[in-house]
Amino acid sequence: MASMSSPGMAAIPEATVARLPVYLRALRTLQDRGTATVSSEELAAVAGVNSAKLRKDLSFLGSYGTRGVGYDVEYLIYQISRELGLSLDWPVAIIGIGNLGHALANYGGFVSRGFRIAALFDADPRLSGNRVAGLVIRHVDELDEVIADLGISIAVIAVPPTNAQAVADRLVAAGVTSILNFAPTVVTVPEGVDLRKVDLSVELQILAFHEQRKSAEGKGARGGRTVRRSMREDPVNPDPDQAQAPERPAEPPIRQHRSAPDLNEVLPA
Amino acid sequence: MASMSSPGMAAIPEATVARLPVYLRALRTLQDRGTATVSSEELAAVAGVNSAKLRKDLSFLGSYGTRGVGYDVEYLIYQISRELGLSLDWPVAIIGIGNLGHALANYGGFVSRGFRIAALFDADPRLSGNRVAGLVIRHVDELDEVIADLGISIAVIAVPPTNAQAVADRLVAAGVTSILNFAPTVVTVPEGVDLRKVDLSVELQILAFHEQRKSAEGKGARGGRTVRRSMREDPVNPDPDQAQAPERPAEPPIRQHRSAPDLNEVLPA
DNA sequence: TAGATTGTTAATCGATTAACAATC
DNA sequence: TAGATTGTTAATCGATTAACAATC
């Protein structure tokens, strides 16, 4: 009755897949504390989710709990890891060894999750031969060869936005089928290649949105909190509080933003 | 008829808020290309979303488009920026100037989005006084004083996981109300404080999940793709392909993972 | 006016959650 | 057996999307 595309390979909702790493971390925390068995209620509390959601998520993987008892921490870690493919060896390439690439190469979170940083590339020939995290930085010209030799299918892009698309194209041509893009720009890849994006500033922007609303509580009550922010003026609508239907500009409004360097100088090549 | 908590401050769905930064980036891309006016169809294509979703999202902000014409790029950038609070000045503190903190301090994406890195802290006294991104690193003992003096309400945690909770507590005590946590551990904050988490390895784990499924297409057809991965054995279930209902272990199974350093040594203090 | 495109409605889809029967 | 907790059902909620009337 349940529709699954093929036996032994049931569809798992994306939302669930995205939470499995969170459960994994919570389980490791419990394991470090010496916990052998955990109930969905306890585990949910550590992971910061609703226990019904947790049980539903885990049920997509199989029946790995024991009614009346709970889940065996070690066994569940093993099963989730296997489901995520973390019990396989994933050699990973990082392209762009600027500040961020450097940090990522040294990021223990990758290694401890079953990923192995296998190759580092940079377009700057002055960096070639330098060692970072025990690996020699290679010039991007060697990319195709090295990717093929090492059998790398997952790559991380940490180059400036202007170069990101070119690097992605090159990676795809070399046989990479999964790309994690840290460059703050839109990158497109062909069908069959997975691309995920991490924008370090998006979360900060979301925080700013909520922070602004906190301060705006009670509408214009500037004294509600300490005035910590220097408010820039709204060129179109001097009183932003009655901005429900602001005039549309006959000509484009004066932008109040500093002429931002945007993100082209963000990541050193 | 529409329910909104207060006039001029309509509720905006979280999913929409999370996409506004994406639209903003797409609009900046268009602006750089010299585009003055854009239709929802075009903008949606650049942002990589459905055009109906885009229009619905924008409608939460107001009616900033012109029927039959489209959206004025400059004006829409201005309105989204204002909605996100990016037209305000947000001084930000970074705690933990290891590899990641260093990269974040230099990350142009913060600055170009209206954020101003205002203070850097580290627990290592040897780093105190060093300059990063034009700012002097201060010792965390000065945290309370500096946060108050500079009127900082947003902070970024880039310390090792073991110290993250203590730093968060300290930040909250100092008056910070929005925290972006890069430390791969669960951190809790009191009501009224916003906490968002960035786990650099989660996205990679999600990619691995899909990559594994790609290789598993056709079930056990090892030749479907180049065999690039060295498969470790499943200690419980030697043939993972018929793992629909694996035996639950009488005793916890042998973990095949290397005894991972986990994330305690991840980020240098 | 004719053509284009927004803003919004309403249908659909997927994700969350409470509740509980199954069962250890 | 009695108590506890899973795995699953079904109700609810929110997000997505197609379609189109409003209108520039």
Image: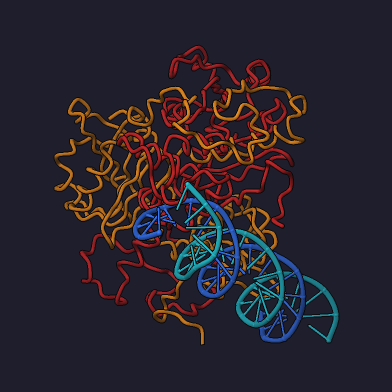
Chain colours: A orange, B red, C blue, D cyan
Q: Where is residue A103 drawn, in percent x and y? A: 39, 34
Q: Where is residue D1 drawn, in percent x and y? A: 83, 86
Q: Looking at this view, is B84 or D22 the one in front?
A: D22
Q: Looking at this view, is B99 or D4 the one in front?
A: B99
Q: Residue B159 sits in which quadrant?
A: top right
Residue at the (61%, 52%) spot, across then down: B13
Image quadrant in which the N terminus of chain B is located: bottom right
Residue at the (41%, 47%) spot, across then down: B69
Q: Where is residue A63 drawn, in percent x and y? A: 56, 75
Q: Looking at this view, is A99 or A235 the one in front?
A: A235
Q: Looking at this view, is A265 or B13 the one in front?
A: B13
Residue sticking out furthest to the top: B129
Above or below residue A222? Residue A75 is below
Apparent side of residue A20 relative to residue B7 in the rendered image (left or right): left
Q: Where is residue B93 drawn, in percent x and y? A: 56, 25
Apparent side of residue A110 relative to residue A23 in the rendered image (left or right): left
Residue at the (31%, 55%) spot, across then down: A178
Residue at the (22%, 48%) spot, across then down: A169
- Total numbered labels placed on residues in the image: 0
Above or below residue B20? Residue B236 is below
Apparent side of residue B21 relative to residue B43 in the rendered image (left or right): right
Regarding residue B182, the answer to whether it shows in the image is no
Q: Residue B238 sits in which quadrant?
A: bottom left
Regarding residue A26, the answer to whether it shows in the image is yes
Above or below residue B124? Residue A109 is below
